[in-house]
Structure formats: C-alpha cells, structure tokens
Image (tube, coloured by chain):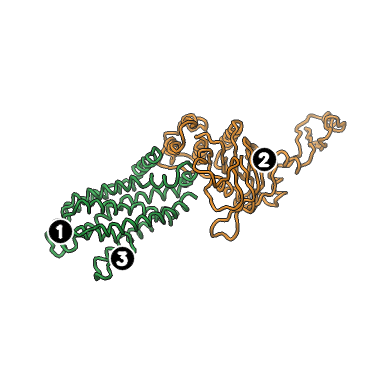
Chain colours: A green, B orange
Amino acid sequence: MKKILKLAFTDFKLIFRDPSLKSFLVLPVIMFALIIWAVPPLLEKYDFLIPYLSLFLVVAVIENTQMFCFINTMVLIDEKESEVAKVYGVVPLSKLEYIVSRFLIPYLFTVVLNLILLFIQNICELSLVSILLISFLAALVVPVYALAVNSVVQNRMQGMVYVKAFNMLVLIPIAAFFVPEKFVHLFGIFPTHWVFQAIDNATQNLPVGLFAAVGFIFFLVLLWVVTRIFIRKHFA
Amino acid sequence: MIQVENLVFQYPGNDGPTLKGLDFSIAKGEIFGFLGPSGAGKSTAQKVLYKILEGYKGQVNIDGKNLSEWNNSYFERIGVGFELPNHYLKLTGKENLELFAAFYPNGKKHNSAELFEMVDLQDAMDKPVETYSKGMKMRLNFIRAIQHDPDILFFDEPTTGLDPVNAHKIKQHILDLKNQGKTIFVTTHSMETADGICDRVSFIVDGKLVLTDTPRNLKSSYGKEAVTVDLKGGKTEEFPLKDLGVNPQFLDFIKQGEVKRIHTLEATLEEVFIRVTGKSLDHE
C-alpha cells in the first residue's frame, strides 16, 4: 500500500509542477458551472431542447472524465519518452501494483467528480442508485483511455494526435440519440455507448441496471486487454 | 551466480535473432564485461537477464534457479544502471531517488544524502533534475542502481556521458562494489572501462560471443612478450621479456644513456578486439 500511495502522490507532484497539466484541473469546475448556471436557463428558454436534456448530462459526465484521461495519458507518455518507464520494469513492484497505483486515485477522483456533478445538477431528477452506477461506470473511461493511448504512442506529439482521436471516439455514441430505435445499439461497439444509454434511462426514471452491467463488463474486458498490451510495450 | 547457456533472443518483427546462442557465466564477486560495438547485442543480453525482455530461448540461471522461476523478489536483489539518464525531470534528484527507494524493503537501503555525496551531487540533490547536466543525470542513474544494496548489478555503458574525472570515480565505485562481494555485469564499447574494471571480458559481435578471457591474458597473448627501451637522444631497442634481468644486451643498452621510457609490447584490448573480430569498437 505504501508503494501505491508513494507513486500516486508523485503523480500529483508531477501534475502540479507542469503548467499544461495543472491547467486541466479547472475543467470540472467549468463543467459544474455550466451545468448549474448555463444549462437550466437554456432549457427554460428553448423548449425544443427538453427532449435532449439527457444529452447535456451525457456530455457533462464524459467531459468530467476527460480531465484525468488527458492528465494520466500525458504523465505516462512523458514517462515513456524520458525512459523512466524502464526503471519500473526493474523494481520490485508488480505490474498490477503499478497499474493500480497509477489509476486508483484518478479513478476514485473521477467517480467523486461525477457524483458531485450528478448531485448538483438540477436539470432532472436522478435516483441515488442511478447516480452511483453512472458515476462508477463512467469513471472507467479514465484507465481504459490512458492505457489504450499509451499502448500505441511513442512520444508526446503522437500522444496529442491520439488524444484528439480518442476524444472523438468516446463521443461517437452520441449519434445513437439521433438514429431510429432499431439502430441505437449498433453503437454498442463503443464502450461509452452503454454509459450514455444508462444516463438516458436514468433521466427518464427507467432502470439503468442492464446498461450499467453491460457497460461494466465491456469496460473491464477492455481494461484487461489494454492493460496486457500496455504492460508489454511500456516497460521495454 | 549467473549461468547462461545457448541464449537466443529475437525481437518481434525482426528477421533474425539479436542474440545467437550466448554461453557465459559470472561468478559471485566478479566483474564481467561485454565488450562490443553498438548493435552487437550487449544491452539485449542484459535486458534478458534483468527480465525486461521475455520470450528468449536457452537457459538462464541465477543462483542455481531458473530466471523464469524468480518472482518479484529478484528485483530486490538486482540493481540496474541504464545506458541513458532516465529520471522525472520535474522532480528533484532526491525525490527521484526516494520514489524508487520506496519500492524496496527498508533494511538494507543506503542513506540518500550519503549517496549524493559519494558522487559529488550533494549540492544538487534538492534541485529539479531538468537543471542537471547529462553527467549529473548519469551519476544519479548510478546511485539509484545501488541504493538498495543489491547483490547483482547491471551497468550498461556506465561511463558514457561522464567527464574523465567522474568516469574514473564511477569506475572506482564499481571496483569498491566488487570488493564488497557484489556480482557485476558491465556492457561497454569503451576499451578503457573494460580494461580498468573487468575481471573477465567477452567480445560480442553480431549477437555472438567470440572470445572470453581476462583483459591481462588477452593483451599479453595477442601482444609481443617484449619491452621497448627508449633512451634520451632517440636510441630505441626491443628486448624479449624472458630473462630480461640477466640479458647482457639489455643491461648494456640501458647503461648507454639516460632511459626515457621502458614499455611492454602487449596489445591494447581494442587491438585484440580488432584482430579477433575484424571489426572496430566504434563500428555502428
């Protein structure tokens, strides 16, 4: 546990000493402000937006995860580029401990940010169970995203390109809200689709359990796959 | 301590193996060196031994136990000095050292301030590594490798990037580690480093070990067992080493004038390397 906390603490030092990473820490605050003060007046003024109110929450939740997606991705890319990653390959820290130490705190932070967001928003009523399931599910984007990007990139420049591509990938399933009912789950090949569908159901007071379960299984399988690829590439 | 038999390794996607059946062993307390040009497979062999590369063929035993059977405790016993500096630039030298120290059990760890002092970095230990020169970063590499008092040490080009004074100090520290009973595997393309610290060296070219022996044996067996005597005034003559002290020509010659220099005609390691392999150590 001491090893895990030491590394997690170091990550925060690295974030606070890098101006570009530090600036990303304000992203959730902006998101909270928009959700509290900008969205409700919009919905009040423009009635035609009301059928799409789940979309506001979908975007807010996914953008909430993007702070640690970006920060963790960049910390790991820097580690690879500076070859510090090789040192982790020769210390008595198992690869699982390494992954846990890198992502447990960012994951839990993102869960908390999602909980805050879903509790403070006043655009729709959400049950406690829905809020908890959505918060824990959506935060899984963070490790999957950062590990996936770091499984394919070699340096910061490539990283920036892939970050842009992955930002689009996580949002693609929004298209499911604009297609006929029978085509909606074609977007199920994207893991975030199940988060979005869970949020959509939650805003309509429908059960979210099934979508959340599919989402958890999808994310955990994906996490296992990208972790294996990442471990093979990161330390060599 | 370390036994390697028929070690073969091929990088995924490569046409052929980088290591083509290496056989060598390193005894406890020995400094063993791989001497060879860039791309010969020196670092690859080390990477297999410190478990960064998997999928090798052949037998690797550490303390009589197959390398693949060692769990994470293996990493408590080894220390690795990488070829290039690799540190968190935004952290101070001390923070870098202490981060990696946290992964080892407490008992044997060296005091970090003493380590910084050992390599003359005491004034820089609280400065961010991004302000360090390459030589300073390499010295930080060195103390990171030894901070947990490992039994086995791997140094990849340990004097690269160091000025002659610091290179000498690092070589001296490596010899001190040997005197403490550490087993040390060094790779280098520097003849001077190999000659200065290694008990035995292997010449490695294109993934194969060509020759293994002590630097002294290599130099004498490929050199000439003779001395050259230079006198002030320019006279020079060569005499066989055998019975030199009772050789009347030699004794007469050194009385003919002031002796400027007497030197043996043993080969340098680099000359031996070129004669044995047909390649230069700078060969890329």
Q: Which quarter shows the N terminus of chain B?
A: top right
Subunit ID for the residue under disc 2: B
Q: Are marks 3 and 1 in contact (CB under 8 Å)?
A: no
- Residue at x 39% of width, y 53% of height: A147
Q: In the image, is A235 to the left or to the right of A218?
A: right
The answer for which chain carries disc 1 is: A
Q: Is residue A102 above or below residue B252?
A: below
Q: Which mark is residue A187?
A: 3
**Chain where mark 3 sits:** A
Label 2: how many Cα within 10 Å (few below 14, some 14–19, many 20+): many
* Residue B195 drawn at (x, y percent): 66, 39
Q: Give amino acid for label 2.
A: Arg
For the point 65% across and 37% down, the residue is B196
Provide residue B10's location: percent of width, then percent of height: 58, 56
> Please, is residue B267 above or below residue B208 in the view?
above
**Residue occupied by mark 1:** A42
Q: Nearer the viewer, residue A149 or A99?
A: A99
* Secondary-structure class at tag 3: helix
Image height check: is B250 above or below A96?
A: above
Residue marked by disc 2: B200
Q: Closer to the camera, A4 or B174? A: A4
Q: Residues within 10 Å of mark 1 (few under 14, many from 20)?
A: few
Disc 3 or disc 2, which is closer to the eye?
3
In this rendering, the label closer to the viewer, 3 or 1: 3
Q: Nearer the viewer, residue B114 or B50?
A: B50
**Point 25% across, 61% down: residue:** A197
